[in-house]
Amino acid sequence: MASPIACANLRKTYDAKVEAVRGLSLRIEAGECFGLLGPNGAGKTTTIEILEGLLAPTSGEVRLFGHTWADNPRQLREWIGISLQDTRLSEKLTVRETLELFASFYAEPRPSEAVLAELELTEKSDAWVGKLSGGQKQRLAVATALVGNPRILFLDEPTTGLDPQSRRQLWDIVRAFQKKGGTVLLTTHYMDEAERLCDRLAIVDRGVIIAEGSPSDLIDRLGGHHVVEFQVSNNVNDNGSNTDGSNVSSNVSNNGRDNVTNNIVILSEAKDLLHNTAPEETIALWRSLPGVESVRYEDSTICLTVREPHLTIPALLDSLDQQGHQLEHLSTRQASLEDVFVKLTGRHLREN
Amino acid sequence: MSTETTTPIPRLAVPPPVLAAPTLRNGRWSGYKRLLGARMLELKREPEIIFWVFGFPLLLALGLGIAFRNKPANTTSVAVVQSAGAAQTMALLQSSSDKSSPAHSSIQATVLDRQSALNAFHFGKFDLVVEPNPDGSVTYHYDPARPESVLSRSEIDAALQSAAGRRDPLPTSTQVSSEPGSRYIDFLIPGLLGMNLMNSGMWGIGFALVEMRQRKLLKRFVATPMRRTDFLLALTSSRLIMTVIQVAALLGFGVLVFHLPMRGSLLSVLFLAALGGVTFGAVGLLTACRAQKLETASGLINLVMMPMWIFSGVFFSSQHFPAKLQPLIQALPLTALIDALRAIVLEGASLHSQSARILILAFWGGISFVLALRWFRWT
């Protein structure tokens, strides 16, 4: 049986100059929840709208269950349910009226009452859409996607701007759909959403997939599963030159002493320099500690990706002591997709 | 799309398995019915729409109908300057029969001292000041820039002269003509009806569409198996239903309040109104077929409506414009609609006699609809 979603070499160029998608291929299997993860402007929405048949690609091919959009668009529309990014449904219709309107477009819809119950909207079914909270509106948007009894669910940033409880509620809805055998494609720029919800995901940046796999695969590729983050300052007597306490202070260089500077380097104006701002020797120093897989600087914080934190941390403390530095802050956490993204691109997901 | 990079996948004869067994089956027209129902509900729940579509034209008709009502008797207000001849002038004015006045006005005269009379005249309280001179002659103070003052001068003069014994050499008689059908309000109501159909067609379709486009609701709709023609059909149907109600409200109001005569057949009026409603709906569709923002749309809608507001003869006859402009003015859809409505309502003309105007309307509607479909932007 053909994959629910497959595309090859998708390209989309706007106005013959802006390349939103630059050669993107995907294959998503039945029953999978697949995530497109990337920062704003990475081409996620363009990609999903091409797959949904709402945008024509400049080149490349899309097949849903083996059919192209040119074959029989009406038939394909019967099989998919869509929640667009930020659709404002008619405010003066009630929740039930809205759902029944959408149900009427499909040949074999599900009963509206059942969908309302499933999405916990029964109580609100006679309320005007304009009176709903953000979470309820988003659930209604997903309800309009589910009422057609789809085989594939497309969700474009389904939880952006929602409170934590509403987000979890939506995740449950997606999982329930998946449990029935449905295939889900969603876009998100939230790490935790991608990690918890998706079986597989593709990290998209600047219109291309830069990594693809299950969340744990991707984190494995970092080398270490833990991240140690710390900040240091020099000895008290060296600190006087930088008293304003601001991280956005001018370039600080303590006369090259030890090449380890406090508040290392500030990169507000040159994010892409993230990797290269600290002197080579310093990076090499941290890198040489036991169990360290990679080193990066983030403003004044030094982040080490490590395999075994119980070996690294004592060594780190010793090393700082020897150099006469004072530890200002230390924390450890599990490595996340954010670390994967930063490692691959040198940028954070939420930066613009 | 190129297919060179992937091997062709055989088309599925059977659809992918459903996740939940279907319990409902929708018919061919279920989408259309729901769309129409939803549209009517939205209109009903939007108080502004009710006001602009029904309240506003009725208020306009009422206001203009009262302002321009045919006054049963105009009153000419004059001041007579206190003097020796004042009493005699007053007597002459009173003895003059008002039948001699062409405007059927009654004369209201007041005696005042010279200064107060002139002051009150300047403030518009009197149309004319009559000053009897010691030698028996009379001086009129009047303002040639004020039509009522000019009229008053000639009326008072005629009244005084005939009361003083003037005999007109040419015998004349007059026939009064102010029956329903030839009054301003009768002229106005079909004009307002046409204008109202234009307004609500342009705003009701054009603005509503751009709003749905801006909300991404249009995009959401076309992401479903909804038939696009059903959507446009439902929008048109809602406009037709509104048209019938608008015609009934405005004509009913005219007949009940102003005794507007309905000389033609009601069916013809309804047909014409429906055609007008759909035509302006199509023009609205064309105007809004690409606009992404409400501001752009309102600008465009006003731009399209402006020439018709001015030239199509809503409030006064379009014949007042120079003959050179007439072919253009007559080709405007609103001119065609209003002129045909007036002919049917006021003159009892048949639909057949209005076929040229009907063709003009249908032409505008048809062209707009075809172009709108070609250029329409759903997303």
Image (cartoon, rainbow, N blue to C red):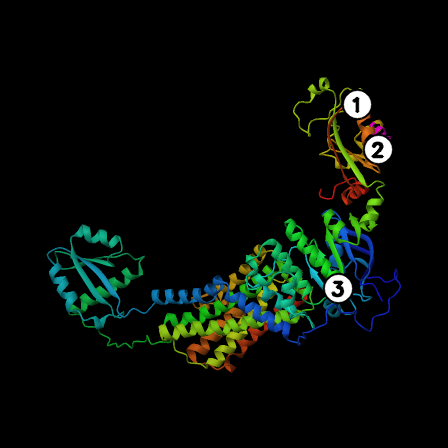
Query: Separation of disc 1 and disc 2 at Cα?
Result: 16 Å
Q: Same chain, marks 1 and 2?
A: yes
Amino acid type of disc 3? Lys
Labelled disc at residue A180: 3
**Which residue corresponds to the image point at 22% horizontal and 74% vertical from the top-left?**
B169
Which sits earlier in the primary sequence, circle 1 or circle 2?
Answer: 2
For marks 1 and 2, give the one nearer the viewer. Answer: 2
**Which residue corresponds to the image point at 77% horizontal and 70% vertical from the top-left?**
A72
**Magenta stretch encompasses residue A287:** yes
Q: Badge 2 is on which residue?
A: A311
Horizontal side of B49 relative to B187 (left or right) equals: right
Above or below for A55 versus B32 = above
The image shows residue B254 at horizontal and vertical percentages of 39, 73
Q: Badge 1 is on which residue?
A: A321
Q: Which residues are magenta?
A: A282-292
Query: Separation of disc 1 and disc 3 at Cα?
Result: 57 Å
Horizontal side of B276 relative to A224 (left or right) equals: left
Viewer-nearest residue: A297 or B207: A297
Check the picture and name the quadrant holding the C terminus of chain A: top right
Query: Separation of disc 2 and disc 3 at Cα?
Result: 45 Å
**Magenta stretch encompasses residue B303:** no
Check the picture and name the quadrant holding the N terminus of chain A: bottom right
Viewer-nearest residue: B253 or A307: A307
Image quarter of residue A89: bottom right
